[in-house]
Image (cartoon, helix red, strand yellow):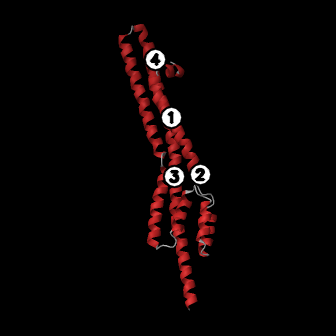
Amino acid sequence: MTFIQFLKEHWLHVLPILIAGTFAIAITLERFQTLFRTYPLKDTSAFFDTIGKFLIAGQVQEALVHCDKFAQKPAVAIVRQALLRAHQPEPLIESTLEISIHEAQQAIQKRTAFLSTIANVATLLGLFGTIAGLISSFEAVGAADPQQKSALLAAGISTAMNATMMGLAVAIPCMVAFSFLMSQSNRLVSEVEQSAIRVLDLIKQRYYCAQKEIAQEAA
């Protein structure tokens, strides 16, 4: 049995695997676009140098305007939330950063785990088709003439192997894509956490610089 014949004659087995594969392709394309092109902040050092200059000069509004230029970047969203509370006590800024980091992690990691699920489901669907093909094969062989047994057995085994191949053809790319996307997700989460630490440090520097100026004026 050729693979095309298998697709035509066993579409009830093939259709769920193809549907799973279609969902996997859509998720993979969207996540690769988001995680590798939309979310990463290309020049982190230059961005924080600019933010630091604005903060030391007391130009918080200008720093917020600069953040708005990178509105889609999770790391910048963290910085913006901290700047909005730059005038508040440190514990309030830290609590805002914790909430913002959690929200950014959810945005970065959403839908990626579905690829692992789809890979497992596709493998099981392929295994289901394999078992169904073997059962059909042995039932046909048991009731067939001796001259037809070998041909029927070969056709049944071919059906079973094609089902396995279909499931693995979806599962393997899913797991490869899942590994790449999880690696990038972890890198972006680390970038977000580092951004929170850096912006908090800049806000503290601004506070101490302001306190120093007040002390010098009082002296």
Q: Residue at x 35, y 13 (%)?
A: 142
Residue at 49% x, 32% y is: 19
**Which quadrant of the figure contains the C terminus?**
bottom right
Residue 37 shown left or right of residue 165 in the figure: right
Q: What residue would you read off at disc 4? A: 155
Reading the image, the residue beneath label 1 is 21
Which of discs 4 and 3 lies nearer the camera? The answer is 3
Q: Are marks 2 and 3 in contact (CB under 8 Å)?
A: no
Q: Position of residue 127 (x, y in %)?
A: 41, 30
**Numbered circle sitting on residue 44:** none
Helix, strand or loop under label 4: helix
Q: On screen, 214 above or below 82?
A: below
Q: Which residue is mark 2?
A: 38
- Asked if the residues shown at circle 4 and circle 2 are in contact, with their CB atoms under 8 angstroms apart, the answer is no
Q: Amino acid at mark 1?
A: Gly
Residue bearing mark 3: 185
Toward the front, the furthest residue is: 61
